[in-house]
Amino acid sequence: MTAGATGATGGTPRAPERVDPVMGRAGRVVAATLAAATVAAASVFWWFGGAGPVLGRETCTVSVGDRTVRLSPEQAENAATIAAVAERRRLPARAVTIALATAYQESDLRNLDHGDRDSLGLFQQRPSQGWGTPEQVQDPVHASERFYDALERVPGYTDGVVTDVAQAVQRSAFPEAYADHEEDARVVASALTGHSPAALTCTVRHGSYERESEGGDGLTDRALQVRDEVDTTFGEQETGGYAAGGVDSGHVAGSAHYDGRAVDLFFRPYDDPEQTRVGWAVAHWLVANADRLGVATVIYDDRIWSARRSAEGWRDYRHPSGDTRDPVLRHLDHVHVDVVRGT
């Protein structure tokens, strides 16, 4: 497979959703407030008895500064995977912007099972051109890996024009169309690479789940799936908050850790900006995949997102013990994630 293997080769460019590019670590209060306001305006929820939302439209928003991009849960999941693969490969945010702009144009960030000739998947990669088997190119992780393989062979891709670089990889029939999505891609990439904290939020309405008991490593199957998928997508992480046979101390009363529904993902030292950035990349990935994985709560860096209050986006987090300077209790050094309990 060469860097010029054909990707999309036809179709009419879609009208872009215009959002100005914003990169860098944005103010979390502005981002979270705008995200919550956008979601609240778009969705109305009914609540009863703590069971969560029963009416509403599932959607995700990415707000950086005064710019907002809206995504479906499927689009958010795929975008988060594209960004996570880049993080595991230690690629710069610019690579994510290029990949997202490409996937926007080729598939609208959807894992398509059809396309021009034998084109398939997020990047409309063609098995006949060496991108992989039909099954492989429809695996978002594999598709992202192969895209980045080709991208890294483009000289000066980090400084090149998005249209030119994307075209060097894809050889599309509509090369200019990639530029239509660069602004959206920059905003989404800024959040998903952790440069803009608390910038991505999703409203979810979990259906009914069966209650699970502790299994492997003292985790329920849902919690184990979350831990293992983070490891698979980002690379092996330092984790804790669980143990074979379960844990019965070290957490607040009623903690999801006690019934094996919670995992802590550590990013230390907590005062290292790079560690904090990676922590936010993982936290955003978890929220983007909350609908699919049954994620109930994500806590990190003095912020909390919960499915039951997802219309509010990320909120300030205050530990049940009250105001504290303890970095562990404030979740400055770890991302806490727990999954739904079930009935």
Image (tube, rainbow, N blue to C red):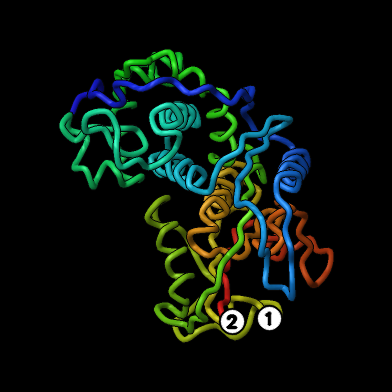
- Determine whether the residue tagged by mark 1 lies in a helix, strand or loop: loop
Residue at image coords 66%, 48%? 271
Residue at image coords 51%, 24%? 181
Image quarter where the N terminus lies is: top left
Residue toward you, 99 or 245: 99
Residue 63's spot in the image, x, y percent? 67, 37
Residue at image coords 52%, 69%? 240
Q: Is residue 160 visible?
A: no
Image quarter where the C terminus lies is: bottom right
Q: Which of the numbered marks, if any, corresponds to residue 34?
A: none
Residue holding disc 2? 258
The relative height of residue 69 versus residue 340 in the rendered view (above or below) is above
Which amino acid, mark 1?
Gly
Residue 164's spot in the image, x, y percent? 39, 13
- Determine whether the residue tagged by mark 2 lies in a helix, strand or loop: helix
Q: Is residue 104 visible?
A: yes
Residue toward you, 310 or 99: 310
The relative height of residue 114 versus residue 316 in the rendered view (above or below) is above
The relative height of residue 331 versus residue 16 in the rendered view (above or below) is below
Characterize the local packing of mark 1: few (<14), some (14-19) or many (20 or more) Cα atoms within 10 angstroms: few
Residue holding disc 1? 254
